[in-house]
Image (tube, rainbow, N blue to C red):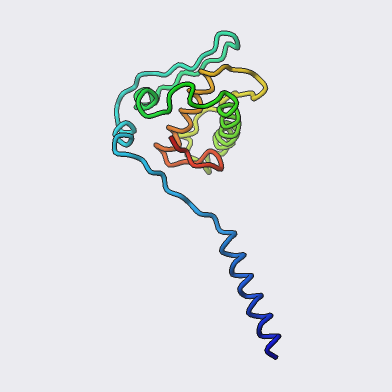
Amino acid sequence: MEKKLIHTLLFCLMFCFGLVSCTTQKSTLDVSSEEKALFDSEDEEPVEIADDETEYEIIIIEPGFYTWLNSIARPEGYYSQSFLENRNAIMVITWNQRVLQPQRWNPNLYEMQINYDPSIDYGYEVNYKLYNYFIYFQRKYNQRLGPFLPRI
């Protein structure tokens, strides 16, 4: 009788442990007051992302992004190009999936698809600015475009 009770208790404990370990933990972003002020700014200086060799060009007109890029974001050279390419590939897939689902995701946030081919070398500057736009976007609009927190 005692053996059956012990087995039942062990089973219940293992079940509870499994249930707790399967739940996801949501971490909140730590956004400074300086960064929040940039999110609310009316600065509309466009940021051009271009590479002459691949004829790739994106112009980002997002209030506050230009100033955020030049004051808050990590400087060029902080990340390796392969790191930026890997993160951009993941975030572009998520972005494009959300563009195609306007009934589920805010179409005012996800307006246009991004044509990003991971097999093309866009160069460091394109990857750096695209990556930082994704970080800025996620932090400003409280979105997640990948399995990782958008940290600076």
84, above or below 58, in the image: below
Q: Nearer the viewer, residue 56 or 129?
A: 129
Residue 1 percent coordinates (x, y) = 70, 91
Task: Name the residue: 32% across, 31% down.
Answer: 38
Quarter of the view holding residue 45: top left
Viewport quadrant of the C terminus: top left
Q: Nearer the viewer, residue 44 or 148?
A: 148
Residue 29 percent coordinates (x, y) = 41, 44
Task: Name the residue: 39% across, 25% down.
Answer: 69
Q: Residue furthest bottom?
A: 1
Task: Name the residue: 65% across, 76% down.
Answer: 10
112, above or below 121, in the image: below
Q: Nearer the viewer, residue 130 or 7?
A: 7
Residue 120 percent coordinates (x, y) = 65, 19
| 92 left or right, relative to 138 | right
| 52 left or right, relative to 139 | right
Quarter of the view holding residue 121: top right
Picture mark count: 0
Residue 108 percent coordinates (x, y) = 44, 34
| 67 left or right, relative to 49 | left
Q: Nearer the viewer, residue 148 or 43?
A: 148
